[in-house]
Image (tube, grey):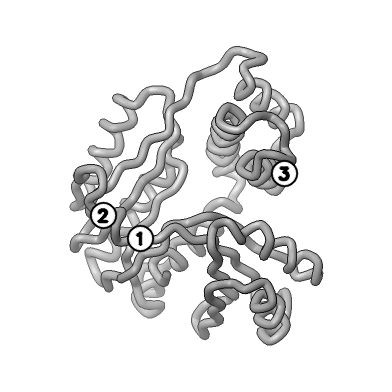
Amino acid sequence: MSGHNKWASIKHKKAATDAKKGKVFTKIIREIVVATKENGAQIENNARLRKAIEDAKEANMPQDNIKKAIQRGAGEIPGAVYEEMVYEGYGPAGVALIVEVTTDNKNRTASDIRKMFSSHNGNLGEAGCVSWMFERKGYITVKKSAADEETVMNTVLEAEVEDFKSEADNDLYEIITLPSDLETVKNVLKEKNIVVESVEVTMVPQTQIALKGANAKNMLKLMDALEEHDDVKNVYANFDISSEDMEKLNI
């Protein structure tokens, strides 16, 4: 999980800046549209839509934007038609990458993704070339300042989570669940008044590739470029960069 975690920490810092709000809104709106189109506009029956609306509220998206996105997904008002695509490939030093996108122009997006890979010492591969290296899991983080370790650990273990981590160089507790148990565990934490930092379904790598120097720098630049693209929804990778090297890179 270390590569995912380090990037998740960087991503949360970036998302907190006002300059990113436009991109955050764009991605959340697309998720609301697709979630509504896929499973309907009834929030109580659509966990994906429920999560997207929670993300919208956390990002301070106006209620009117949320309403219009749901209407677009339900076909009540016109709008772009989105497709979900998954790209797989390799980054610097053979790091495995999975890129999930939501696009209204798959030819444009494919060209953009291919160019970003090649510009950062990587290359796109065929479908399935790296996905076997990952497992889909629920992933919850809680800031260590929110509660003591024993309280958080005892709370989530009662909910039968798969793993709980509290590493010295990370200011977050990490909780791994089955995707189907994610919402249940989140609600258990909230019932105990433990503030949740992030909740997501993610792809957890089974092994990591340690990076340093130029490879580490290029890997982070590639991740940043992919995350910046409006069509990119999620990026998963199996790299690991030590805390010392992260400090050298001023991250």
> Where residue 130 appears, x then y in whole percent?
26, 54
Q: Amino acid at mark 3?
A: Lys
Distance, label 3 to label 1, CA atoms, is: 30 Å
Above-or-below relation of 153 to 46: below
Quadrant where the N terminus sits is: bottom left
For discs 2 and 3, the disc positioned in front in the rendered view: 2
Q: Are marks 2 and 3 in contact (CB under 8 Å)?
A: no
Q: Amino acid at mark 1?
A: Phe
Q: In this image, 68 relative to 243: left or right?
A: right
Residue 93 figure quarter: bottom left
Secondary structure type for disc 2: loop
Distance, label 2 to label 3, CA atoms, is: 34 Å
Q: Are marks 3 and 1 in contact (CB under 8 Å)?
A: no
* Marks 2 and 3, the one that precedes in the sequence: 3
Residue 215 figure quarter: bottom left
Q: Residue at x 67, y 27 (%)?
A: 70
Q: Which residue is mark 1?
A: 134
> Where residue 118 appears, x then y in whole percent?
19, 44
Q: In this image, 246 relative to 30: left or right?
A: left
Q: Residue at x 59, y 50 (%)?
A: 17
Above-or-below relation of 33 to 177: above
Secondary structure type for disc 3: helix
> Where residue 12 appears, x then y in whole percent?
55, 58
Q: Which residue is mark 2?
A: 130
Q: Which residue is mark 3?
A: 57
